[in-house]
Amino acid sequence: MGAPMLGALLRAGCEARGLDIRPVSEFGALSAHLTTDVAGFGAGLKTAITVVRDIAQTDALLFGPEGLLAHAPGLEILIISSTLSPRYVLGLRDRVPDRIALIDAPMSGAEVKAKSASLSFMTGGDDTALDLCAPLFEAMGAHTHRMGKYGAGMQAKVLNNLLAGSNTVMTRLVLDWADQAGLDEAGLLALINTSSGQNWLASGFDEIEFARKGYDPGNTLGILKKDVESALDAAPEGADTNLPKLLAQMVGQLKPRP
């Protein structure tokens, strides 16, 4: 997600650069705007957007002697765009220096929307910081939803991804059953797109990069399972979590589809 988001910022004329642990040569035309050197990346940095996979990678990126916070003394705004447990995100306020404004801005749309700069962002934070960052979200996305104070964007995102997970599991199950009934996949997907079963995965089945994949901890379905578990981590006290727990299990059981 991070590479196409960086590309969108550059196309919009933003002064932007990226940091990754992988060799910059893997990023083609973007390589000139990427570095593996955290010290060089942090020099003069005012606003940072984190787009890593999970809590462990976020901790590694931000904290410690080789972390971003140790090498970006001028950092003013930190935008968390990874989908993480809302409890963890709220806890960052006690770990990040007060001089740095925190925004949570997870996004929806997967790689296909990142490449077309049409992501949907769910944001939480101080209005002044959000106003300053509005041009960045506009460059990378088609929709920005202000959900409230810091942490509200992440809470909204994990709830959204509960629905995305259920749509993913049920669409794949429906297509498998349709195969057994002898129905044409393309015809059924066209029907679903104009009928009451319409959902994001079915409507974008030929574009979404993970639509036919089987579960693997390292792929997008692995991220989706992590997102469902992040929602569970922030479930209201006394909530019935049986269905979300089953959903996480079923995402983890998805097999590749031809």
Image (cartoon, rainbow, N blue to C red):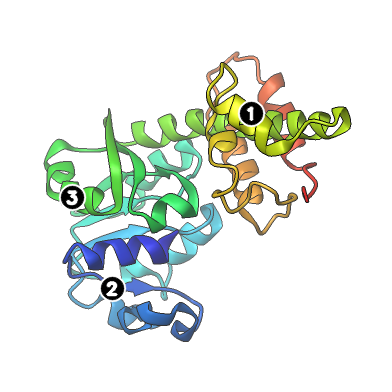
The picture places residue 60, in percent across and down from the top left corner, at 48, 65
Q: Which residue is mark 3?
A: 133
Q: Considering the image in quadrants, where does the N terminus appear?
A: bottom left
Mark 3 or 2, nearer chain start: 2
Mark 1 to mark 3: distance in Å?
Answer: 32 Å
Q: Which residue is mark 2?
A: 17
Whether residue 160 is visible here, answered yes or no, is yes
Mark 1 or 3, nearer chain start: 3
What residue lies at 30% left-to-right and 38% top-to-bottom? Answer: 123
Q: Amino acid at mark 2?
A: Arg
The picture places residue 6, in percent across and down from the top left corner, at 32, 65
Mark 1 or 3, closer to the camera = 1
Label 1 neighbour load within 10 Å: few <14, some 14-19, many 20+: some
Judged left or right of residue 96, residue 256 is right
Element at label 2? loop
Q: Which mark is residue 166?
A: 1
Q: Amino acid at mark 3?
A: Cys
Element at label 1? helix
